[in-house]
Amino acid sequence: MIRKDCTRNMLLEVGRRAFLERGYANSGIEAILNEAGVPKGSFYHYFSSKEEFGLQVVEVFAQQCESWIDEALGDLTLSPLARMRKYFEGMVDSLAGQGCRNGCLVGRLSQEMADQNEVLRQRFESIFSAWTDRLADCLREARDGGEIAADLDVRDLAEFCMNGWQGAILRAKTARSTVPLRIFLGVLFQHVLRPRSGDGPARIEPRNEQPGPF
Protein backbone atom coordinates (compact mmCIF):
# COMPACT_ATOMS: atom_id res chain seq x y z
CA MET A 1 0.00 0.00 0.00
CA ILE A 2 2.81 2.40 0.91
CA ARG A 3 4.58 1.70 -2.40
CA LYS A 4 1.35 2.24 -4.34
CA ASP A 5 0.74 5.53 -2.55
CA CYS A 6 4.30 6.62 -3.37
CA THR A 7 3.71 5.91 -7.06
CA ARG A 8 0.48 7.89 -7.06
CA ASN A 9 2.08 10.78 -5.19
CA MET A 10 5.03 10.79 -7.59
CA LEU A 11 2.68 11.01 -10.57
CA LEU A 12 0.79 13.89 -8.97
CA GLU A 13 3.99 15.79 -8.22
CA VAL A 14 5.35 15.28 -11.74
CA GLY A 15 1.97 16.36 -13.09
CA ARG A 16 2.01 19.51 -10.96
CA ARG A 17 5.42 20.50 -12.29
CA ALA A 18 4.43 19.72 -15.85
CA PHE A 19 1.20 21.71 -15.66
CA LEU A 20 3.01 24.70 -14.18
CA GLU A 21 5.81 24.64 -16.73
CA ARG A 22 3.98 23.60 -19.89
CA GLY A 23 0.27 23.97 -19.15
CA TYR A 24 -2.43 21.31 -19.22
CA ALA A 25 -2.82 20.83 -22.97
CA ASN A 26 0.93 20.60 -23.62
CA SER A 27 1.53 18.05 -20.85
CA GLY A 28 0.98 14.65 -22.40
CA ILE A 29 0.46 11.58 -20.25
CA GLU A 30 3.32 9.80 -22.03
CA ALA A 31 5.78 12.54 -21.11
CA ILE A 32 4.58 12.57 -17.50
CA LEU A 33 4.99 8.79 -17.28
CA ASN A 34 8.50 8.96 -18.74
CA GLU A 35 9.53 11.66 -16.28
CA ALA A 36 8.09 9.71 -13.36
CA GLY A 37 9.49 6.40 -14.59
CA VAL A 38 6.09 4.77 -14.27
CA PRO A 39 4.44 2.38 -16.79
CA LYS A 40 1.18 3.39 -18.46
CA GLY A 41 -0.76 0.66 -16.69
CA SER A 42 0.07 2.20 -13.33
CA PHE A 43 -1.32 5.56 -14.41
CA TYR A 44 -4.69 4.09 -15.34
CA HIS A 45 -4.73 2.10 -12.12
CA TYR A 46 -4.99 5.41 -10.23
CA PHE A 47 -6.66 7.73 -12.74
CA SER A 48 -9.39 6.94 -15.24
CA SER A 49 -8.51 9.87 -17.53
CA LYS A 50 -6.31 12.91 -17.92
CA GLU A 51 -9.19 15.04 -16.62
CA GLU A 52 -9.37 13.04 -13.39
CA PHE A 53 -5.61 13.23 -13.08
CA GLY A 54 -5.73 17.00 -13.56
CA LEU A 55 -8.44 17.35 -10.94
CA GLN A 56 -6.41 15.38 -8.41
CA VAL A 57 -3.26 17.39 -9.14
CA VAL A 58 -5.26 20.56 -8.51
CA GLU A 59 -6.80 19.04 -5.38
CA VAL A 60 -3.39 18.35 -3.84
CA PHE A 61 -2.27 21.89 -4.62
CA ALA A 62 -5.47 23.34 -3.13
CA GLN A 63 -4.95 21.32 0.06
CA GLN A 64 -1.39 22.62 0.35
CA CYS A 65 -2.67 26.16 -0.05
CA GLU A 66 -5.35 25.58 2.58
CA SER A 67 -2.66 24.45 5.03
CA TRP A 68 -0.71 27.65 4.39
CA ILE A 69 -3.84 29.76 4.77
CA ASP A 70 -4.61 28.01 8.05
CA GLU A 71 -1.09 28.68 9.32
CA ALA A 72 -1.00 32.33 8.25
CA LEU A 73 -4.56 33.51 8.86
CA GLY A 74 -5.01 31.29 11.90
CA ASP A 75 -2.12 32.86 13.83
CA LEU A 76 -4.09 34.60 16.56
CA THR A 77 -0.93 36.13 18.05
CA LEU A 78 -1.12 38.65 15.19
CA SER A 79 -3.76 41.21 14.31
CA PRO A 80 -6.04 40.36 11.35
CA LEU A 81 -4.19 42.67 8.95
CA ALA A 82 -0.82 41.34 10.13
CA ARG A 83 -2.09 37.82 9.41
CA MET A 84 -3.06 38.85 5.88
CA ARG A 85 0.34 40.46 5.43
CA LYS A 86 1.97 37.22 6.58
CA TYR A 87 -0.12 35.25 4.09
CA PHE A 88 0.77 37.39 1.09
CA GLU A 89 4.42 37.94 2.03
CA GLY A 90 4.94 34.20 2.38
CA MET A 91 3.74 33.73 -1.17
CA VAL A 92 5.98 36.55 -2.41
CA ASP A 93 8.98 34.78 -0.87
CA SER A 94 7.95 31.49 -2.45
CA LEU A 95 7.50 33.04 -5.89
CA ALA A 96 10.82 34.87 -5.58
CA GLY A 97 12.49 31.55 -4.76
CA GLN A 98 11.39 30.12 -8.11
CA GLY A 99 12.35 33.20 -10.09
CA CYS A 100 8.68 34.20 -10.53
CA ARG A 101 8.41 31.55 -13.23
CA ASN A 102 5.55 29.28 -12.23
CA GLY A 103 3.08 31.10 -10.01
CA CYS A 104 -0.23 29.73 -8.80
CA LEU A 105 -1.28 26.41 -10.35
CA VAL A 106 -4.98 27.23 -10.12
CA GLY A 107 -4.47 30.63 -11.70
CA ARG A 108 -2.20 29.17 -14.39
CA LEU A 109 -4.63 26.44 -15.41
CA SER A 110 -7.77 28.55 -15.09
CA GLN A 111 -6.40 30.99 -17.69
CA GLU A 112 -5.81 28.09 -20.05
CA MET A 113 -8.72 25.76 -19.38
CA ALA A 114 -11.72 27.77 -18.17
CA ASP A 115 -13.06 27.97 -21.73
CA GLN A 116 -12.04 24.43 -22.61
CA ASN A 117 -13.24 22.19 -19.79
CA GLU A 118 -16.33 22.89 -17.69
CA VAL A 119 -15.46 20.38 -14.98
CA LEU A 120 -12.07 21.99 -14.39
CA ARG A 121 -13.55 25.49 -14.63
CA GLN A 122 -16.06 24.76 -11.87
CA ARG A 123 -13.35 23.32 -9.62
CA PHE A 124 -11.10 26.33 -10.17
CA GLU A 125 -13.96 28.67 -9.31
CA SER A 126 -14.82 26.75 -6.14
CA ILE A 127 -11.19 26.94 -5.01
CA PHE A 128 -10.97 30.68 -5.66
CA SER A 129 -14.27 31.16 -3.83
CA ALA A 130 -13.03 29.21 -0.80
CA TRP A 131 -9.82 31.25 -0.64
CA THR A 132 -11.82 34.45 -0.96
CA ASP A 133 -14.09 33.35 1.89
CA ARG A 134 -11.06 32.97 4.15
CA LEU A 135 -9.83 36.45 3.30
CA ALA A 136 -13.32 37.86 3.90
CA ASP A 137 -13.40 36.26 7.37
CA CYS A 138 -10.06 37.83 8.26
CA LEU A 139 -11.13 41.22 6.91
CA ARG A 140 -14.35 41.00 8.91
CA GLU A 141 -12.24 40.58 12.06
CA ALA A 142 -10.15 43.59 11.01
CA ARG A 143 -13.29 45.69 10.50
CA ASP A 144 -14.87 44.59 13.77
CA GLY A 145 -11.62 45.34 15.59
CA GLY A 146 -11.30 48.81 14.09
CA GLU A 147 -8.26 48.11 11.92
CA ILE A 148 -10.15 49.13 8.79
CA ALA A 149 -13.06 51.48 8.24
CA ALA A 150 -16.47 50.25 9.38
CA ASP A 151 -18.10 51.15 6.05
CA LEU A 152 -15.92 48.80 3.97
CA ASP A 153 -17.63 45.75 2.45
CA VAL A 154 -15.41 42.83 3.45
CA ARG A 155 -16.65 40.51 0.70
CA ASP A 156 -15.92 43.08 -2.00
CA LEU A 157 -12.52 43.70 -0.42
CA ALA A 158 -11.75 39.99 -0.38
CA GLU A 159 -12.73 39.69 -4.05
CA PHE A 160 -10.50 42.66 -4.85
CA CYS A 161 -7.60 41.09 -2.94
CA MET A 162 -7.92 37.75 -4.71
CA ASN A 163 -8.44 39.21 -8.18
CA GLY A 164 -5.68 41.77 -7.81
CA TRP A 165 -3.27 39.22 -6.40
CA GLN A 166 -3.82 36.79 -9.26
CA GLY A 167 -3.25 39.61 -11.72
CA ALA A 168 -0.08 40.65 -9.92
CA ILE A 169 1.21 37.07 -10.14
CA LEU A 170 0.67 37.14 -13.91
CA ARG A 171 2.60 40.41 -14.19
CA ALA A 172 5.37 39.07 -11.94
CA LYS A 173 5.77 36.07 -14.26
CA THR A 174 5.98 38.37 -17.28
CA ALA A 175 8.45 40.74 -15.59
CA ARG A 176 10.38 37.93 -13.86
CA SER A 177 10.27 40.15 -10.79
CA THR A 178 8.38 40.46 -7.51
CA VAL A 179 7.96 44.21 -8.09
CA PRO A 180 4.33 43.88 -9.34
CA LEU A 181 3.51 41.84 -6.24
CA ARG A 182 5.04 44.39 -3.90
CA ILE A 183 3.35 47.30 -5.64
CA PHE A 184 0.01 45.54 -5.22
CA LEU A 185 0.65 44.87 -1.53
CA GLY A 186 1.83 48.43 -0.93
CA VAL A 187 -1.34 49.91 -2.41
CA LEU A 188 -3.50 47.31 -0.67
CA PHE A 189 -2.19 47.86 2.83
CA GLN A 190 -1.47 51.58 2.66
CA HIS A 191 -4.52 52.80 0.77
CA VAL A 192 -7.25 50.21 0.22
CA LEU A 193 -7.33 48.68 3.68
CA ARG A 194 -7.57 52.08 5.25
CA PRO A 195 -8.25 52.61 8.95
CA ARG A 196 -11.09 54.65 10.38
CA SER A 197 -11.17 58.25 9.17
CA GLY A 198 -8.51 60.39 10.82
CA ASP A 199 -6.36 57.50 12.02
CA GLY A 200 -3.72 57.84 9.28
CA PRO A 201 -2.48 55.16 6.88
CA ALA A 202 -2.85 51.51 7.75
CA ARG A 203 0.22 50.17 9.54
CA ILE A 204 2.24 47.64 7.55
CA GLU A 205 3.63 44.88 9.73
CA PRO A 206 7.22 43.61 9.28
CA ARG A 207 7.70 41.04 6.55
CA ASN A 208 7.36 37.40 7.41
CA GLU A 209 10.17 35.24 6.05
CA GLN A 210 8.34 31.90 5.91
CA PRO A 211 7.69 30.60 2.36
CA GLY A 212 4.24 30.07 0.98
CA PRO A 213 2.84 27.08 -0.92
CA PHE A 214 4.15 27.96 -4.39
Image (spheres, helix red, strand yellow):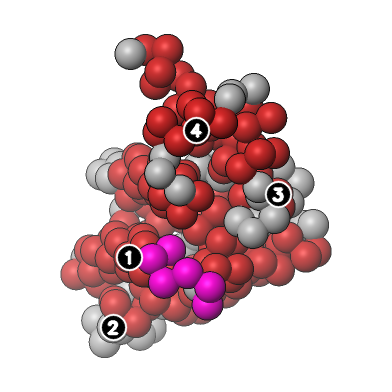
Mark 3 / mark 2, whichever is N-terminal = 3
Disc 4, SS: helix
Disc 2, SS: loop
Residue drawn 37% across and 12% down? 2
Q: Residues within 10 Å of mark 2 (few under 14, many from 20)?
A: few
Q: Which residue is mark 3?
A: 21
- Bounds of the magenta span? 115-120
Relative to the observer, which residue lies in front, 178 or 103? 103
Q: Residues within 10 Å of mark 1 (few under 14, many from 20)?
A: few
Task: Name the quadrant of the N terminus.
Answer: top left
State the CA–CA distance, disc 3 to disc 2: 37 Å
Mark 1 / mark 2, whichever is N-terminal = 1
Mark 2 / mark 4, whichever is N-terminal = 4
Mark 4 / mark 1, whichever is N-terminal = 4
Q: What percent of the width, then of the height, locates residue 156?
A: 34, 82
Query: The disc labelled 4 sits on which kind of residue?
Result: Phe
Disc 3, SS: helix
Mark 3 / mark 4, whichever is N-terminal = 3
Residue drawn 64% across and 59% down? 25
Say which of marks 3 and 4 sits in front. 4
Mark 3 / mark 1, whichever is N-terminal = 3
Q: Residues within 10 Å of mark 3 (few under 14, many from 20)?
A: some
Q: Which residue is mark 1?
A: 126
Residue drawn 48% across and 22% down? 7
Q: Which mark is residue 43?
A: 4
